[in-house]
C-alpha cells in the first residue's frame, strides 16, 4: 500500500458581506422564519454582489489559504475547483483562478459533483499527491448559488447561500496521518430530483428557457431529503467500520450543510455525539461545494479545536446524485 498520504496544510475561506436573513425572505416570498428554521436549521445566508462571479470568491479563499501556509502562488502544482456555478462554461474557474493568482506552474480543472464537489475534489487532489507527481495542490469549493436560485420560489430560495472555501494539500511528513480513506458514489437516476433544466447542450439558453425559468435550481426536496439521509449516513458508517473506528473514536464529523435534520440523522447512525458535529448551516445555509471547507475553517482557524491525531470524517450528498465520505487523521 502506498504510504505517501496527503494532508490539509491550511484552510482559507471567503464569505460575502451581505446577509440575507429569514426575515428578509419573509418579505420576498410566502414563508416564515419559523418554517425555515424548524425545517432546515437555517437563520441567514450570505449573498455575493452581482457581477463578481465564482472566481472572485474562489481567489479570495485561495489567497487566505496560501497566506496561512506561507506558500507563494507560484509554488502550486495544481488547482481543482469543485463547483456547479462557474463564472462561465469555459474557460474553467480553475483557469481563471490560476491566472488571477499568477500560479504560473499550476494546471487544473473544475469538478462538477453538486454538493459533493469539495470532497470529490479533495480526493482527486490527494491522489495527485499520492502519485508522487505533485507537492502542492489547491482544492477549492466555491458556489454562487444566488445566481441560479429563483427568489420567487419559496421551495428553493430559502435553502442556499454563496461562499468559497479552499485547502492546500501537501504530502504528509508522517505515515498514518492525512487523508486516509474515502468512499465516493454516484447514481445518475437521482438527477431527475435535482437539476437545472436548461443552459447545457441538450437545451441551450433561449427566450423560452428564460421565460420558463429553466436556468434555476429545480428540486424535489422530499426525494432529495430521503436519499440524502440514507446515503450520507450509509457511507459514513461504512468508512468508520472498515477502518475499525466507532463514534467515540471520531473527534469531528464535518457533514455537508444542507439541512440540520439530515445532519442529525447521519450523526445518530454513526453514534457520534452532537458536540462533535460541526454545524454552520444556521449562518451560511447550503453553500453547495463550500460547506465542508467552511466548517473546516471554523474548527481549525476560528476555534482551533482540531488537534494532531484527531480522526475527522467529512461526508456529503448532492445533485447527481453524488455522495461520499472521507476519513482524515489530522496532522499539523
Ligand atoms: N416556507 C413555507 N412553506 C414552504 C416553504 C417555505 N420556504 N417551502 C415549501 N413549503 C411548503 C410546501 O409547499 C409544502 O406545502 P404543501 O404540503 O401544502 O404542499 C410544505 O411546506 C411541506 O413541504 P415538504 O417539501 O414536505 O417539506 P420538508 O419537510 O420535506 O422540507 C426541505 C423541505 C426542502 C427543507 C427538505 O425536503 C430538504 O431539506 N430536502 C433536502 C434538500 C437538500 O438537501 N438539497 C440540497 C442537495 S444536498
Image (tube, rainbow, N blue to C red):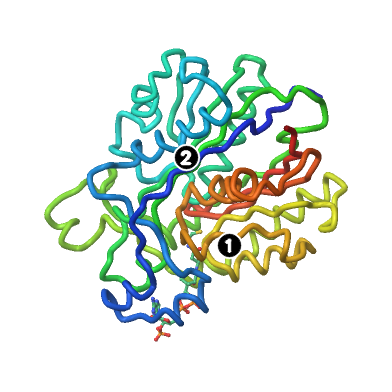
Quadrant of the drawing holding the N terminus:
top right
Estimate the x, y position of residue 165 in percent, counting from the top left: 49, 42
Tell me if 26 is positioned left or right of 241 in this view: left
Q: Residues within 10 Å of mark 2 (few under 14, many from 20)?
A: many
Q: Which residue lies under the disc numbered 1?
A: 228
Secondary element at tag 2: strand
Q: Nearer the viewer, residue 64 or 148?
A: 64
Secondary element at tag 1: helix
CA separation, marks 2 and 1? 19 Å
- Above or below, 264 against 141 in this view is below
User: In which quarter of the view is residue 130 placed?
Assistant: top right
Q: Which residue lies under the disc numbered 2?
A: 82
Estimate the x, y position of residue 285 in percent, counting from the top left: 46, 61
Cβ of disc 1 within 8 Å of ligand 1?
yes
Quadrant of the drawing holding the C terminus:
top right
Q: Nearer the viewer, mark 2 or mark 1?
A: 2
Residue that extends furthest to the right in the rendered view of this protein: 244
- Above or below, 132 against 117 in this view is above
Q: Nearer the viewer, residue 258 or 66?
A: 66
Tell me if 89 is positioned left or right of 302 in this view: left
Amino acid at each position: 500500500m502506498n504510504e505517501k498520504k496527503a494532508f490539509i496544510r491550511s484552510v482559507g475561506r471567503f464569505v460575502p458581506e451581505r446577509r440575507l436573513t429569514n426575515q428578509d425572505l419573509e418579505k420576498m416570498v410566502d414563508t416564515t422564519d419559523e418554517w425555515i428554521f424548524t425545517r432546515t436549521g437555517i437563520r441567514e445566508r450570505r449573498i455575493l454582489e452581482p457581477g463578481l462571479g465564482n472566481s472572485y470568491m474562489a481567489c479570495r479563499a485561495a489567497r487566505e489559504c496560501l497566506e496561512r501556509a506561507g506558500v507563494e502562488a507560484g509554488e502550486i502544482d495544481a488547482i481543482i475547483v469543485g463547483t456547479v456555478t462557474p463564472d462561465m462554461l469555459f474557460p474553467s474557474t480553475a483557469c481563471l483562478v490560476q491566472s488571477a493568482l499568477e500560479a504560473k506552474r499550476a494546471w487544473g480543472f473544475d469538478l462538477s459533483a453538486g454538493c459533493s464537489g469539495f470532497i470529490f475534489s479533495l480526493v482527486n487532489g490527494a491522489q495527485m499527491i499520492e502519485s508522487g507527481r505533485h507537492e502542492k495542490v489547491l482544492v477549492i469549493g466555491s458556489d454562487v448559488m444566488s445566481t441560479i436560485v429563483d427568489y420567487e420560489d419559496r421551495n428553493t430560495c430559502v435553502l442556499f447561500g454563496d461562499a468559497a472555501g479552499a485547502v492546500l494539500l501537501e504530502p504528509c511528513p508522517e505515515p498514518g496521518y492525512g487523508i486516509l480513506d474515502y468512499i465516493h458514489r454516484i447514481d445518475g437516476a437521482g438527477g431527475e430530483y435535482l437539476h437545472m433544466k436548461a443552459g447545457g447542450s441538450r437545451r441551450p439558453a433561449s427566450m423560452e428557457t428564460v421565460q420558463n425559468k429553466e436556468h434555476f435550481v429545480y428540486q424535489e426536496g422530499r426525494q432529495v431529503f430521503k436519499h440524502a439521509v440514507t446515503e450520507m449516513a450509509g457511507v459514513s458508517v461504512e468508512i468508520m467500520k472498515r477502518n475499525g473506528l466507532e463514534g467515540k473514536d471520531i473527534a469531528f464529523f464535518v457533514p455537508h450543510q444542507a439541512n440540520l435534520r439530515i445532519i442529525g440523522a447521519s450523526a445518530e447512525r454513526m453514534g457520534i455525539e452532537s458536540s462533535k458535529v460541526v454545524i454552520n448551516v444556521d449562518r451560511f445555509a447550503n453553500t453547495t461545494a463550500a460547506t465542508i471547507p467552511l466548517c473546516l475553517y471554523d474548527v481549525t482557524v476560528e476555534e482551533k479545536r482540531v488537534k494532531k491525531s484527531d480522526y475527522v470524517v467529512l461526508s456529503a450528498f448532492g445533485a447527481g446524485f453524488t455522495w461520499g465520505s472521507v476519513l482524515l487523521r489530522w496532522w499539523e
